Image (cartoon, coloured by chain):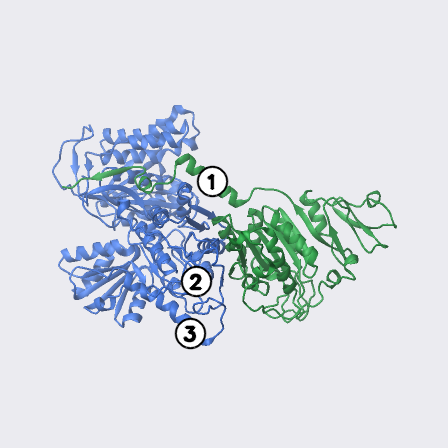
Chain colours: A blue, B green
């Protein structure tokens, strides 16, 4: 953390000098019961209100409470905030706040050299060191490598709440607020919004304890000699407008609500709890006033079956799940392909196969969603690029679903789902608005008579007089929709289903290249890899290595001009969190030598990882 | 003039598709009787939806001139649930079989029944897999020899009535494919019921399990082998001159011979009450051949709130308390800030 500017006068009444800096990344780490996600979230909210650009990376174990003090139970939350435009949670934190030796051990190697490491000194007991696998106290050795700040957070916390009559266990639960208060001081943030939130959230005496500890942390920073200065990251110069902080899952849920409003059809969400998708169900369940019907089904299959039933009945059917659930939904999805009903299925990808790493991110469901159903079963696929883009992608998915009478898959991922960014709130008037059209006219009606332009069949729903008809999973006769076993008809219908989806390529934006329109290297990305790749391309350019960047929001069909664009570059690099799925598709589709840059560690790309490959190729 | 105002007939409910079940299949009789009942139910044709899964019985929707959705194996109750939750005004019928409903789809049937959506579930029980050509089903009797069980089935069968009662069904009934009068009566009752109406229809498969229900299908033996359940009536069956009654003591049924002209109540014969406890329902369900007759009729009919009513009420309450949702207000809720132009 090099001060970007000389000392300025203090804004917060702090007696210490304030350094203005451009950006900083902080990582809070502790036991999964220490409240690290809460601490990170609250710090994020204050950062958003301070007008900084930001990006976060929550990283927590699948176990709700792993044994205390062990490496398995370490939970972390990283936030990168800045006065300039940023796109990633940062490769390496400048500041690490570690609540115990295990958390320190699991994270210390990521911290920037000479970065600040704040530890809870009280947690460095012989027992905790053993649990973390340390033979000796690691702190002395760290003093050389980092700015080590040792604070007896546990003791100071107990001291602050000692007269409240709490049990020791209750008292200890407040200690994350000490660290939060300290960080508020260190980065010149007001404590008031968090104090107000605590007042609403906790009953006495826990409320009193948390508020006191928050302030104790703040005042500790102010008075201790451990911190000679505090820091200020000025508001970011980003596109003007009204902003809010948003995570991918919240944006996704709001996108579903918005689709219902903009298409003037009620929304039906069928879902079964699964990490990391459950938050979308939780969020949507709060919006009954929008006419949103959420249904927690008995399993993944019932969830999608009910959603297909809803679409059949004229609602906007939707499902949210993750990989293992997506797999279970494929048969019902195939029925929606055969019956040509509008439906949006969201797969918030996580690392697999099988249960895999439920809380860790990956982008490895692309081929399953594209090809994982029996027989020829094409569906459109769209993927959000950023947390805020999850909102817009849902509107796009519903647009395609209804216009083309087809199920659509949305591929989000665990990283996008949980990470947050400032989001420019769109003006509702600027959002796509097109009321869904239901068929009502019995004159000339046939269930599979297609719109010549889109090849969509009519959306004829029960309750409409004169349109009574039967549909199902058996092959349909062209136009009439009656059951047909005719070989010629089956070939024709297979072709029509494929043509309908392929035709969507004419109805989506062309692929756009950022950087030179032709040249030596094109970096192609999809989904949550966007931020790291865009930053890598920019940083490489500044370092004298110029590559171009193309990000795909539509993965099936691809934009109509994609083949032509790819052909303008000598080499194509595809960074993706799998073992080469998009690169394989590009090779198959366009006969180009797309090279994958694969990462399957459950973590998003670091900018450096992509940059290194770009620069190696261009060197 | 709307169609509802016109007097509909059976013909109105027949679709233009050729019916393709095997000759002699019990499904023909069920189809004909349902088509006969439909015009009496007072529901406009466009508001009726038949939903099915996979199996012989699941071809049913194609033959009804209403809305129909032939879905995937075992999941019909879930598709039907989605339809009913979305559009509570629709009259939704699920047609399933012993394999579709109790094997692959047992889970969905269980949960649909316990949620008590207001729909009818007709489970055609022929105790065999017909469409896949003759394997044993979850209701097949132990020891049944089929292509997949040449040495005899080792499965202990599930009883559809006890299953439905166990799932908390508010309406449970059993009827017989070829007993037109009784079948129509039970279908009417099922439709009248608000909540999930579960109906087991004993159905003959002439190809793979012929004669499974012969004793209750055959008019000449029906009296002796079927115990017709009637509300407020004693549990009596048998030919006129050889009446027998069923006692239920501590949940255990037993038979008693009734002398000519005797009052069954004086002989301790139980009186049927659809609204009695589930335990009584289970006791009735345990009345089965070979020791006992086969009870047919309504086992249980009680009132409970339906899922779609509760869901609709939540939506209405949310609108009342919070006002109709406004997208702009949602997007601007919570903490926001403005970035001014430079």
Gap in angstroms between the C-alphas marked 2 and 1: 37 Å
Residue A124: name its quadrant.
top left
Question: As displayed, is residue A7 above or below residue A484?
Answer: above
Kind of element beneath mark 1: helix
Label 1: few (<14), some (14–19) or many (≥20) C-alpha neighbours in 10 Å: some
* Callout 1–callout 3 Cβ contact below 8 Å: no
* Left or right side of A269 for B99: right
Label 3: chain letter: A
Where residue A581 sits in the image (x, y, percent)?
33, 64
Q: Residues within 10 Å of mark 3 (few under 14, many from 20)?
A: few
Residue topped by disc 1: B314
Q: Residue at x 45, y 41 (%)?
A: B315
Q: CA distance from mark 2 to mark 3?
A: 23 Å
Same-chain check, marks 1 and 3: no
Q: Is residue A202 left or right of residue A588?
A: right
Q: Nearer the viewer, residue A484 or A18?
A: A484
Q: Secondary structure at mark 3?
A: helix
Residue occupied by mark 3: A491
Closer mark to the observer between disc 2 and disc 1: 2
Quarter the C terminus of chain B occupies: top left
Position of residue B293 measured from the top left corner of the image (x, y, whole percent): 76, 56
Q: CA distance from mark 1 to mark 3?
A: 47 Å
Q: Nearer the viewer, residue A43 or B183?
A: B183
Which residue position is annotated with label 2? A445
The lab-note entry on whether marks 2 and 3 share a chain reads yes
Pinpoint the chain carrying mark 2.
A
Sequence-wise, the earlier of marks 2 and 3 is 2
State the SS at label 2.
Answer: loop
| Closer to viewer: mark 2 or mark 3 | 2
Count of picture labels? 3
């Amino acid at each position: 953390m090099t001060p970007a500017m000389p000392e300025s006068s203090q804004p917060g009444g702090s007696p210490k000098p304030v350094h203005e800096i451009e950006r900083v990344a902080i990582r809070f780490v502790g036991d999964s019961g220490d409240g690290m996600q809460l601490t990170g979230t609250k710090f994020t909210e204050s950062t958003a209100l301070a007008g900084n650009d930001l990006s976060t990376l929550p990283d927590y174990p699948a176990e709700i409470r792993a044994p205390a003090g062990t490496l398995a139970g370490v939970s972390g939350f990283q936030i990168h905030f800045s006065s300039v435009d940023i796109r990633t949670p940062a490769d390496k934190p400048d500041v690490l706040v570690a609540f115990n030796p295990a958390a320190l051990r699991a994270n210390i190697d990521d911290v920037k050299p000479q970065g600040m490491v704040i530890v809870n000194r009280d947690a460095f007991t012989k027992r905790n060191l053993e649990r973390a696998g340390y033979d000796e106290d690691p702190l002395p050795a760290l003093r050389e490598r980092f700015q080590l700040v040792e604070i007896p957070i546990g003791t100071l916390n107990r001291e602050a709440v000692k007269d409240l009559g709490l049990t020791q266990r209750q008292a200890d639960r407040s200690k994350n607020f000490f660290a939060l208060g300290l960080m508020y001081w260190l980065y010149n943030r007001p404590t008031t919004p968090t104090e107000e939130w605590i007042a609403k959230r906790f009953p006495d005496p826990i409320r009193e304890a948390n508020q006191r500890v928050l302030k104790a942390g703040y005042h500790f920073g102010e008075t201790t000699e451990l911190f000679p200065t505090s820091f200020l990251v000025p508001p970011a110069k980003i596109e003007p407008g009204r902003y809010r902080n948003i995570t991918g899952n919240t944006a996704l849920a709001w996108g579903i609500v918005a689709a219902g409003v903009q298409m003037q059809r009620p929304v039906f969400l069928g879902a079964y709890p699964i990490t990391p998708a459950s938050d979308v169900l939780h969020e949507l369940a709060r919006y009954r006033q929008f006419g949103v019907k959420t249904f927690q089904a008995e399993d993944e299959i019932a969830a999608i079956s009910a959603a297909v039933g809803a679409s059949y009945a004229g609602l906007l059917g939707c499902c949210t799940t993750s990989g293992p659930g997506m797999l279970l939904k494929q048969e019902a999805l195939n029925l929606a392909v055969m019956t040509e009903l509008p439906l949006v299925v969201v797969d918030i990808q996580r690392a697999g196969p099988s249960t895999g790493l439920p809380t860790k991110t990956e982008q490895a469901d692309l081929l399953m969603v594209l090809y994982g159903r029996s027989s020829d079963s094409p569906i459109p696929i769209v993927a959000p690029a950023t947390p805020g883009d999850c909102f817009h992608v849902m509107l796009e998915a519903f647009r395609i679903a209804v216009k083309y009478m087809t199920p659509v898959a949305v591929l989000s991922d665990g990283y996008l789902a949980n990470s947050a960014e400032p989001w420019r709130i769109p003006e509702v008037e600027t959002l796509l608005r097109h009321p869904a059209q239901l068929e009502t006219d019995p004159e000339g009606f046939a269930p599979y008579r297609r719109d010549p332009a889109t090849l969509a069949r009519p959306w004829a729903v029960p309750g409409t007089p004169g349109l009574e008809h039967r549909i199902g999973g058996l092959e349909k006769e062209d136009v009439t929709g009656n059951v047909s076993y005719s070989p010629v008809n089956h070939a024709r219908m297979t072709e029509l289903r494929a043509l309908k989806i392929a035709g969507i390529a004419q109805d989506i934006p062309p692929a756009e290249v950022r950087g030179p329109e032709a040249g030596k290297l094109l970096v192609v990305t999809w989904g949550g890899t966007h931020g790291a790749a865009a930053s890598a391309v920019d940083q490489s350019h500044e370092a004298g290595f110029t590559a171009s960047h193309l990000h795909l929001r539509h993965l099936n069909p691809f934009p109509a001009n994609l083949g032509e664009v790819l052909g303008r570059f000598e080499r194509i690099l595809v960074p993706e969190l799998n073992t080469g799925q998009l690169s394989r598709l590009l090779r198959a589709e366009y006969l180009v030598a797309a090279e994958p840059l694969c990462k399957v560690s459950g973590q998003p790309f670091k900018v450096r990882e992509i940059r290194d490959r770009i620069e190696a190729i261009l060197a | 003039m709307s169609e509802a105002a016109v007097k509909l007939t059976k013909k109105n409910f027949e679709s233009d598709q050729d019916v393709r079940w095997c000759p002699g299949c019990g499904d023909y009789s069920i189809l004909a009787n349902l088509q006969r009942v439909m015009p009496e139910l007072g529901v406009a044709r466009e508001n009726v939806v038949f939903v099915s899964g996979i199996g012989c019985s699941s071809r049913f929707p194609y033959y009804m001139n209403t809305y129909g959705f032939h879905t995937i194996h075992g999941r019909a109750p879930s598709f039907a649930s989605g339809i009913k939750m979305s559009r509570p005004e629709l009259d939704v019928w699920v047609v399933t079989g012993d394999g579709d409903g109790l094997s692959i789809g047992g889970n969905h049937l269980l949960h649909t029944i316990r949620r008590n959506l207001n729909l009818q579930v007709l489970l055609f029980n022929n105790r065999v897999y017909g469409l896949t050509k003759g394997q044993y089903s979850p209701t097949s009797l132990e020891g049944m020899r089929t292509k997949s069980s040449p040495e005899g089935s080792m499965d202990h069968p599930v009883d559809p009535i006890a299953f439905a009662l166990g799932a908390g069904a508010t309406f449970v009934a059993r009827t017989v494919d070829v007993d037109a009068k009784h079948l129509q009566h039970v279908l009417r009752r099922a439709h009248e019921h608000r909540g999930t109406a579960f109906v087991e229809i004993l159905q003959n498969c002439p190809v793979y399990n012929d004669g499974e229900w012969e004793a209750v299908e055959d008019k000449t033996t029906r009296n002796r082998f079927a115990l017709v359940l009637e509300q407020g009536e004693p549990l009596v069956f048998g030919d006129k001159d050889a009446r027998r009654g069923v006692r239920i003591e501590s949940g255990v049924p037993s038979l008693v011979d009734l002398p000519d002209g005797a009052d069954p109540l004086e002989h301790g014969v139980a009186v049927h009450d659809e609204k009695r406890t589930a335990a009584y329902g289970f006791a009735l369900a345990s009345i089965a051949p070979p020791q006992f007759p086969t009870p047919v009729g309504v086992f249980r009919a009680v009132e409970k709130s339906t899922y779609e009513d509760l869901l609709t009420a939540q939506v209405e309450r949310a609108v009342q308390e919070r006002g109709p949702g406004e997208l702009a207000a949602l997007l601007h809720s919570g903490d926001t800030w403005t970035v001014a132009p430079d």
